[in-house]
Image (cartoon, grey):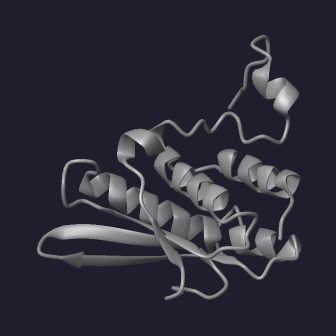
Amino acid sequence: MLTGTQVSALKYLIAHSRGASDLAKRILFFLLDRSNGLTEEVCFSISSEGVEYTEADVKQAGHTVGGMQSCNGTTYLNELTALSGSDFTFSVHSASAFGFVSYRFWLSRKYYSRTAQPLTMSRPELDKIDLTKPGLYPTLETDSRVTRSS
């Protein structure tokens, strides 16, 4: 189990990951928040079927999360969870059928876990996740005089 500070530190590194889309980062924040300190396996899917996500949104989120969890990427998400002492890993899988593209994202003990709890959240709710406030430095995050530089 990760402490709140460890989860915040992981979210901080995700928020500052270069090349990752904001949608991908929000999905990862959402999975972390719902995993209860990396004790509960969770998964979340997005699809270009419907109006919430474009095909480009879905592909970009899938590709950037894949890059962030890959040992060939720059964020090394799974190495970070291992470093924290957790046996949880991030994984992502794509599917396409009937002209639609979808991705499922996991935070679980095994890749593509079949026991992970499927989560739902609307796009407008997901977009409300504030990537500038991962919780690692709460005093700075609430001080309006402090601005984040990229």
Tell me if residue 104 comes above or below residue 37 in the rendering: below
Q: Measured from the top left, where is residue 122 in percent x and y?
A: 37, 48
Tell me if residue 130 comes above or below residue 59 in the rendering: above
Q: Quadrant of the N terminus?
A: bottom right
Left or right: 56 in relation to 31: left
Front residue of 30 and 20? 30
Q: Measured from the top left, where is residue 101 in percent x and y?
A: 26, 68
Could you say which quadrant of the image residue 6 lies in? bottom right
Question: Outermost residue, left direction?
Answer: 98
Left or right: 142 in relation to 51: right
Q: Measured from the top left, where is residue 75 in percent x and y?
A: 70, 62
Residue 20 visible in the current orientation: no
Could you say which quadrant of the image residue 116 lies in? bottom right
Residue 122 visible in the current orientation: yes
Task: Determine the residue positioned at 79% across, 68% down.
Answer: 80
Q: Quadrant of the C terminus?
A: top right
Question: Outermost residue, top direction?
Answer: 145
Could you say which quadrant of the image residue 73 lies in? bottom right
Q: Give the total number of marks visible in the rendering.
A: 0
Task: Determine the residue positioned at 11% across, 75% down.
Answer: 98
Tell me if residue 77 comes above or below residue 144 in the rendering: below
Front residue of 57 and 1? 1
Left or right: 99 in relation to 40: left
Front residue of 32 and 101? 32
Task: Determine the residue positioned at 30% across, 78% down.
Answer: 95
Q: Measured from the top left, where is residue 37 in percent x and y?
A: 76, 64
